[in-house]
Amino acid sequence: MMKVLYIEDEPSLAKIVKESLQSRSFEILHLPDGDHLIEKFHSFNPDICLFDVMLPIKDGFTLAKEIRMLNPQIPIIFITAKSQTADILEGFQSGGNDYIRKPFSLEELIVRINNLYKLCHQNQTSQLPENMILIGRYKFSPTRLELILDKEVKRLSYREAQLLMMLIDHKNEVVNRKHILDTIWGDDHFFNSRNLDVYITKLRQYLKEDSLVQILTLKAVGYRLVDH
């Protein structure tokens, strides 16, 4: 039974989500705010976190940062009414793995929870031998989710690593945008498309120290990772 730590301050929404997840055999701990979060996290030991962004006391982004200090691996999904690129980027920088935008369908939420948990669990339990992939001056570890330049190690989220691996697998080739969305996000609707834009921006930022490594955009087509 998957254990979900759910923080939401809207009582009516929280009741609907909690009851729906429980009916699907999830074990839910719902909290109206992040007060005593650390204590509750340790006692409940969740498999995944579901945080509203706009919360009293501390917002969801702040809570995610606190959880990441305790457990760098646990998947975190944000529930938000915000859709600006800057807001989405802040969420990923704070340690979030995925977003779902209000209003949302419960079916979509359940699919996102299951998909993210499966993805994270596969990465954590993978028994494949460690292989370092060279990208220009960088070394990329797809199993450890790390991008290394000299002695600096950048830890990637699961989805960042998945996207980078897809681009590497087709290095110097065009990867169709719709194919990326269908493979990583499960569909190509608008909000997922915005998320992809944010992830591409983040990967470019991570790779900026080597000018010979570029992620090129082919407008309305897709992306190409170039390693000169």
Image (cartoon, rainbow, N blue to C red):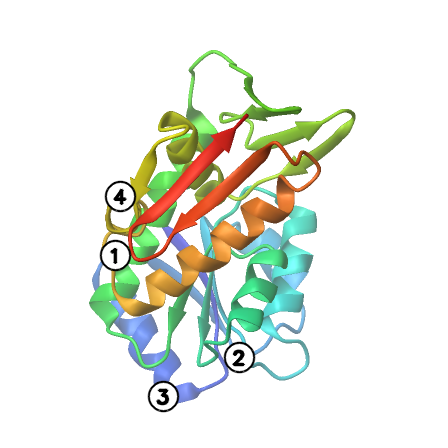
Which is more foreground, mark 4 or mark 3?
A: 4
The picture places residue 106, in percent across and down from the top left corner, at 24, 70
Q: Earlier in the sequence, mark 2 or mark 1?
A: 2
Inter-mark Cα distance, 2 to 4: 34 Å
Q: Residue drawn 33% across and 48% down?
A: 222
Q: In the figure, residue 23 lies in which quadrant?
A: bottom left
Q: Residues within 10 Å of mark 1 (few under 14, many from 20)?
A: few
Q: Residues within 10 Å of mark 3 (few under 14, many from 20)?
A: few
Residue 82 versus residue 197: which sits nearer the camera?
A: 197
In the image, what residue type sits under mark 2?
Pro
Mark 2 touches mark 4? (CB < 8 Å):
no
Q: Does label 4 or label 3 sit earlier along the sequence?
A: 3
Which numbered disc, 2 or 3, marks the residue that appears first in the sequence? 3
Cα–Cα span, label 4 and label 3: 34 Å
User: Does dot 2 land on a helix, a strand or a loop?
Assistant: loop
The residue that label 1 is drawn on is 111
Q: Is residue 56 visible to the viewer in this orientation of the structure?
A: yes
Q: Which residue is mark 4?
A: 183
